Image (cartoon, rainbow, N blue to C red):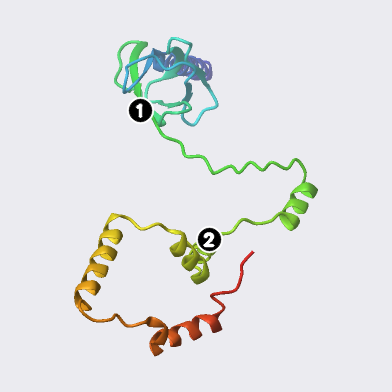
Amino acid sequence: MNHLRALFVLVLLLSGSQLFAQTPDEDLVQFSGMIVASDSLEAVPYVNIKIKGLNRGTTSDFYGFFSLVARKGDVIQFSAVGFKKGEYLIPDTLRSNRYSLVHIMTNDTILLKETVIYPWPTKEQFRHAFVWNKIPDDDLTIAQRNLDKMEMRERARAMPMDGSMNYRNYMDNQVSKLYYRGQAQPITVFNPFAWAEFIKAWKRGDFKRKD
């Protein structure tokens, strides 16, 4: 009786080990395919292909083809520079041990941090240039210098009159002649208001020589 029991247990263990050895082989799938870009449908070479959760995978060739051994239900990850990462789940209902796929990858824009390139090769030269170099004026300083009263006055004096200003000056002279026709025109040297303006200009230094 003991021999029959031992023989039964041995047969059971052998059959279980055989089933255990056959089950993984049935789940293996030769997973292959091609990877293309979404905008042009051109092949994407050298894509990293990895089985999720496992340190195992492959890389697509120059023409975008790939092939690796996986299992039913595995998640395959795709990644490449310039493209968004993608995943694909191998169906667990496959009846064949071969499965093909055309995987489409979408372009991705990668924004890198700003890189500032300085013309100084060493920190010492940069420190010396930072301390001793003359910093150029900013926009506010340039605007204030351009709007200086004395500068504006000099520019106004040197600026020639355009057509409208010449016409205005001519018409003013004609009106003045018509107004004083038949009588002597007043001499401005005796005008107190003109003398007041002259004194103010003299105090401001408008008549000083500028080098």
For marks 1 and 2 on the same chain, the one whose residue lies earlier in the sequence: 1
Quadrant of res 108: top left
**Going 40% across and 90% down the picture, which residue do you hit?**
192
Q: Position of residue 179 (x, y in %)?
A: 20, 77
Residue 205 numbered tag: none
The residue located at (54%, 64%) in the rendering is 141
Drawn side of residue 40 relative to residue 68, left or right: left
Q: Secondary structure at mark 2?
A: helix
x then y, percent, for residue 67: 44, 12
Nearest the viewer among 47 and 111 is 111
Q: Which residue is mark 1?
A: 106
**Most extreme residue toward the bottom, as rendered?**
192
Residue 209 sits in which quadrant? bottom right
Which element type, helix, strand or loop, lies under badge 1? loop
Badge 1: residue crowd in 10 Å (few <14, some 14–19, many ≥20): few
Q: Tell me the number on the disc at residue 142.
A: 2
Q: Residue at x 47, y 26 (%)?
A: 80
The residue lying at 74 percent from left, 49 percent from top is 126
Q: Amino acid at mark 2?
A: Ile
